[in-house]
Image (tube, rainbow, N blue to C red):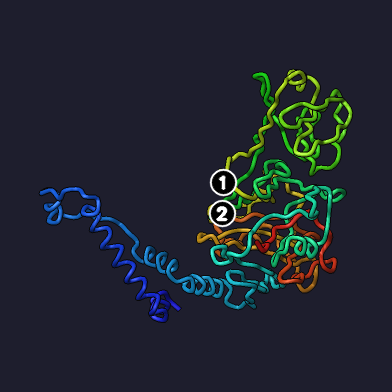
Amino acid sequence: MDTLDLYKENSENTAKLTLNLAILSVALLSLPLLSGAPIMADDIMLAHAPVPAINIDTGQIYNEIFETVSPQARIDKFNNSVKQRYPNAVIKDVDIGVKHIKITKYYDGKPVKINLVEIDRGLAKNYELKPALSSNLNNLQSRRTITTIAKNTNSIVALNGTFFKPQTGVPLGTLMIDKKMYTGPIYNRVALGIFDDGYDVARVEINAKLKANGNTLKIDNINQPRMLSSYVLAYTPEWGKTAPPSPKYGYQIAIKNNTIIESSSNPLVIPEGGYVIVAPLRALRPFLNAKKVKVDIATKPEWKNVKHIISGGPYLVKNSNVYVDLSAQKLNAIGGKNPRSAIGYTKDNTLIMVAVDGREHQSVGMTLWQLASFMQSIGCVNAINLDGGGSTVMYVNGQVVNNPAFKGGIAISNALVLARK
């Protein structure tokens, strides 16, 4: 159905829109009168002056205004776009603005089963898209099944999230929930930023500092395993009760309410609402006698007003082009055909979550390049790979909808969920 047919079917709303546009036109023409400004001769002459050409897409403006006046028009547009994107798929309604799609594609004559969820957050107003930890106590060192995570967060959709350390469950990469940074980036890998009005994708760096007495110390990461003895790391209570051991020649300071409350070369208890900074002693020495210290934690890009961040890697689609920077993000180990998880978004801010089954006769999996081409083909302007393999699992409306090797999916660290507000 084209846009004109849609307008004809919704005649009542079209009449309302016409009335609103007429009122708007009168209001615009009346501005000089309403403002009380005198009408000058020059103003009258303007009516006879040649009007400069202005390139305005009136069709787009009309569509946007019509969708505002008629929510049904936006629903119809979303429904039609999903049908057009997946012409031979099984499509199910999860809720208004949320669709579950099942398709089978063939690569070199072999099948690949794919589950997708498309979300228009402008329609799904009763839900929030956000990352979620496996522990409802926000403990980083935890792992649970995706069904448990979804139920704990009252979610109707969930997809496994970023990489994590199997032994502990600590996420390995940037994770921000409700503007709180839980873990910092690994190798500055690519991440999805979730805003109230849309999304962005970029490779993320930590931008964190310890400040006192005119001194500034760069903090290399937050709640992540130590990679170099020279690194300065910050740990919050979500890491656990105590900070990890200091490196050789290392030292620790515990900070609460901008005050150093304890220092030692031994592991310190992490204060509630505070930090433990673990670093070489020489780096911390200028701060030890400070009366007040400040910890600033941010990211590059700055991403003002970002609400949530979830990382993955590598890129799949960048600015509408296939872009797989596997080596740059130190992810060569995840090549080959495997189960895959991915997220991306379209030019009209529809978010797409993808779970690809693999390592079985009925579904052989995808390479990252095949996944990237697929994400591009369904309209993603930006898309990233998430943790895959045995971690790939998707939950929709109370059940796991894909076919992971371990029934119900293995216990995972975190997920991207669509939770009831």
Q: Amino acid at mark 2?
A: Asp
Q: Is 267 left, or right, of 330 in this rendering?
A: right
The residue sitting at 66% across, 72% down in the picture is 105
Q: Give the image quarter of residue 119.
A: bottom right
Which of pointers 2 and 1 lies earlier in the amino acid sequence?
2
Count of labels in the image: 2
Q: Position of residue 406 (x, y in %)?
A: 85, 66
Q: Position of residue 329 (x, y in %)?
A: 69, 45
Query: Which residue position holds label 2?
Result: 196
Mark 2, residues whose alpha carbon is within 10 Å: few (<14), some, or many (≥20)? few
Residue 37 coordinates in the image, percent (x, y): 20, 48
Q: Kindly identify the residue that appears in the image at 32 percent across and 66 percent down.
A: 21
Q: Residue furthest right?
A: 266
Q: Give residue 415's quadrant in the image.
A: bottom right
Locate the N terminus by quadrant.
bottom left
Residue 192's place in the image compared with 86, above or below, is above
Q: Three-letter amino acid code at disc 1?
A: Asn
Which residue is labeled 1 in the image? 305
- From this view, report whether residue 78 is shown above or below residue 271: below
| Structural crowding at the residue carrying mark 1, measured as other residues with C-alpha within 10 Å and reported as few (<14), some (14–19) or many (≥20) | few
* C-beta proximity under 8 Å, tags 2 and 1: yes
Label 2 – label 1 distance at C-alpha: 8 Å
Residues 261 and 173: in front is 261
In this rendering, is residue 82 above or below 257?
below
Q: Nearer the viewer, residue 292 or 218?
A: 292
Between 88 and 76, which is closer to the camera in this rendering? 76
Q: Secondary structure at mark 2?
A: loop
> Residue 280: x, y in percent?
80, 24
Indicate left or right for 258 with 82 as reference: right
